[in-house]
Image (cartoon, rainbow, N blue to C red):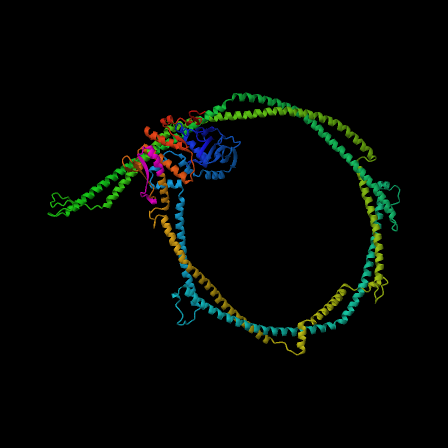
Amino acid sequence: MRIHALTFQAIGPYATSQHLDFTQLDDVGLFLLDGPTGAGKSTILDIITFALYGKADDERKNTELHSTLADPGVPPTIQLDVTFGTRRFLIDRTLQHFASRRGAKDPSDVVTRQAAMSLVEIVAGEHRQLTTRVDEAQQILRGVIGLSREQFTSVVLLPQGEFARFLKASSSDRAEILKQLFNTHRFDEIGEYLAAEAKTLRGTVEADAQRRQTLRAGIIDTAQTYAAAEPDAATPNLEDLDDAELIAHVDGVMTELEAGAQRRVQQSHSVLKTARDELARLQQQQEHLREAQEYRRRRSVHDQQAPVVRQAKLDLEHHARAKAVVEAQQHCDAAQADLTDAVDTLQQRCDAAQQVPIIVAWAAGQDIFTVDASDTQPLIDGWKTVEAAAIRSLEQLTHHEKTHAAIQSGLQQLAERKTTQQTLTERIVQLQQQFDTVCAQLTTGRERAEQLSGVEKTLEVATRQLENAKTQQTAARNAYAAQATAEDAKRVRDETRADAEKALEDAQDLLRRRIDAAAGFLAEKLEPGKPCEVCGSTTHPQPAEAHDLAEISNDAVQESEQRATQARRAANAADETYQAKLQDLQALQTQAGGLSIGEADAAATAANQTVDDAQRQVTELTELGARIKDQDTQTEQLREDKATAQQQLTEITTQITSQTTELDQLQQNLTDALGDYDSVAAFRVAVEPAHRLVGQIVRAGDAVTTAVATHTTAQQRVNDALADSATKDHPAYEHAAQAREHLLDPATQSEYETLVRQWTTEGDRLAEKAGQTAVIAGLQLLQDDVAEPSQEVLDTAHEAQRAAEQALSEATREHGSIQATQNQCRSQQELLTKLSERAAEQLAIYEELVGLSDVVAGRGENAVSMPLRSFVLAGWLEQVAANASERLTGMTGGRYELKHAVGQGGRGHSGLNLEVIDHLNDTVRTPSTLSGGETFMASLALALGLADAVQAQAGGVAMDTLFIDEGFGSLDADTLEEVMGVLAALQDDGRLIGLVSHVESMKQQIPHRIQVQKSQAGSKVNIIGPNLA
């Protein structure tokens, strides 16, 4: 990885945009990241990490990176120009942050702006956009970098104190760090997978065994159920048979049972067929005889009705001939009546029309008011002429009404225009008044805005003072609470100290009493002249006295000592808690500036009031600016409105004059056209009723014409019907009265028609039935004097069939039961065979899985008794130690060397220890015995060695840029010189190395620096050094 440029803004202490051109340092190799504490040196490393991975560390939320010093509305952004291998990328990120809602007046009204990202690859100087989606860009970068964020921060950004912790860590803690860096979780997953597979397979084997026993029990139970009542001596004991023998025996028994049941089913089928055939023969004989007897009866009845049916047919024929003549005569009579009514109606309408003057005028002297029924056509033609005159009068009426409506509409429009004329005159006066008022307000507003100029700066200063006051207020309140907490911690410390002292005194007293009691018990056993069990002396000048002391057990003493130890630990913990609380209290008091809660509250209230006053003035100034702008716009609009109104007034006055002249001319023309009529309404009253009456007369004339034609047609129909009534056997009727005599009443007609229809239908049916097989067979049986089977014979045949059906059902049910049992038994036999074959194979696989799982977990045949995970980690640690020793030897002049040790560790973490070889004294030391400077050198060497190992594990990822954060202050001048030599060697490999340190001598040795300058407005950063612009 090689960084070319970094640009960022509104992040951490950096409020404004900052740019670092790392290409200025390409030929330098080693540079210093310098600046005061808290200025933001480590923030630059966090920014690089965030640009690549979208997260700086696990402690802070992304929104917490947003600078509180940046101006509102400035988003936190990062642009990183970086090369990985042969590919160069431009990464552009906008961090998730809080921003003011659009249009919000309250600064606290904020919304969350989501993170955004753009990833561009630079190929041959051309920028190619890869994606703007965060997830897709992260995936591309992860594949290109080849390291996780944890690996990156351990290999490229060597943080403060991390590798001193790794150097002195326990095996278990070191294992967790190595697992994270080398991603060995998969080896744990292998062990878990093997154990889970073995457990699953063991459950399968046990389940198969249980299922096999269940299957054998079921098969044996089936065989015993169908076994003979008295088994012979050859019948084996089924429990003693193996699976194959049991299957063969039971299959033979069931096959024999199924064959017997099948034979019984076939026999039952044969008996049932014979019974069914006999019953069908008897039923068919009975049916044929009954059909033949019914045929003979119906044929006799049909022959007896023949004479009556012939007379009915003749009467119906006469009725049909007479009906057509009578119906034609009835229609002719009705047409005559309609003609008479039509002539009467027409005469009435003509009489009424003769009384209307305007109709008489329209008639123009024609003789059309008297109706001649024999010749109505001239009269009807005359009235159509009158109707045409009436229509012309209606058209004149329509024209007069339109003229009248136009006059009325014009008068209304004229009145509206006069009203508009008055309104415009008043509006011009009103606009002038408004213009004068707005001009006065505009002058006043500008004077007030001049007075309020500069209040924004006042608000900015007051806001900063309020933030400081609130910070002191919060610190003062927290200090008050912390004081109580510290006093409680002090009380707990004093109590635990007293408890620890008391517990120590009790333990010492108990130990002393046990020793005294033991000496007394031993003295009681002394005998003169016999050696003492302790010293061997045969003389006992001053034996101890027991003083009635009970023997005290060693367990009681140990428990007392454990209580004393626990009490001492509790006292130490309470003292540490108290010291921590005391430090917290002092820090809060310093932050509060020595103010009490009351003083801090008063200062915050005063600062808040100052902010409120300034904010009100700023708001007033903002509103004044908007109002002045609106008033400027309003004055201009008022000028335009007044000019528009004056132009509209001139136009409306001209329109009123012109329209008045036009309306007067229209009114004169209408008066001349109406003549004798006073108004259009009077003309309408005369024309419309007359027109309707004329129309009624024309329609009445048309009705007369239609009635004449209808009557003529009806008379011709009567003549045609009389002529058509003649037939071959009968002459035509002479007149309608003669035909009416042969009509039948509806009831008689219906009766004759039904009789003829039924007799004819019955004849057809009898003819059809005579050809049926059943009737022919029955007639033959009657001719042969065959008797019908009795009910007793039929019942006997039915009973024989039911008995045969029941026997077949029982035989079928028995066969089905045996067959189902046989099929079930065979399925169980097949499953039992498969289970027996599978059991041995699964057991072998299970034993192999268990063995392999034990080896992976460090048990069983594992020769080194190390889990696979620890074995792999030990290999990586050995490589890391070898890499680190090369550099540590150079730093220490060949004195120290790091070596991987295979000592035991807790919870399966053996093989993860480190030892320090001291060649000066030829001793092996633990890392914890190194001095501060030695620890730093060993930690740095270990960090660099670990970085080489992680890069190799990631496929040889080349990390050309390296940052080392702090730790150089613990080195003396000579050691620092040696460390600088190692770093220079790294520089010779083409790496760009950045050191974060406060050591003054390093500033002298490393002239090129990224200088961070700290101020209240926010930090700034630039690159300085010889030969740099």
Which quadrant would residue 207 be assigned to in this image? Answer: bottom left
**Where does the N terminus fall, quadrant-wise?**
top left
Question: Residue at the front extreme?
Answer: 988
Label total for image = 0
Question: Residue at the bottom extreme?
Answer: 785
Relative to the observer, which residue lies in front, 905 or 814? 905
* 554 lies above or below 164: below
**Residue 984: image x %, image y %?**
38, 31
Tell me which residue sits at (59%, 76%) in the image. Answer: 793
Which quadrant would residue 787 be assigned to in this image? Answer: bottom right
**Residue 463: image x %, image y %?**
46, 27
Asked whether residue 860 appears in the rendered view, the answer is no
Q: Does the magenta-highlighted stretch encompass residue 888?
A: yes
Asked whether residue 619 appears in the rendered view, the answer is yes
**Residue 774: image x %, image y %?**
66, 72
Relative to the observer, which residue lies in front, 845 or 527? 845
**Where does the C terminus fall, quadrant-wise?**
top left
Q: Does the magenta-highlighted stretch encompass residue 128?
A: no
Relative to the observer, which residue lies in front, 94 or 990? 990
Relative to the observer, which residue lies in front, 385 or 875? 875
* 409 lies above or below 561: above
Tell me which residue sits at (73%, 29%) in the image. Answer: 414
Which quadrant would residue 12 be assigned to in this image? Answer: top left
Tell me which residue sits at (72%, 26%) in the image. Answer: 653
Q: Which residues are magenta?
A: 881-908
**Relative horizontal placement of residue 591, taking residue 322 as reference (left or right):** left
**Relative horizontal placement of residue 342, taking residue 925 as reference (left or right):** right
**Residue 296: image x %, image y %?**
70, 74
Tell me which residue sits at (61%, 22%) in the image. Answer: 436
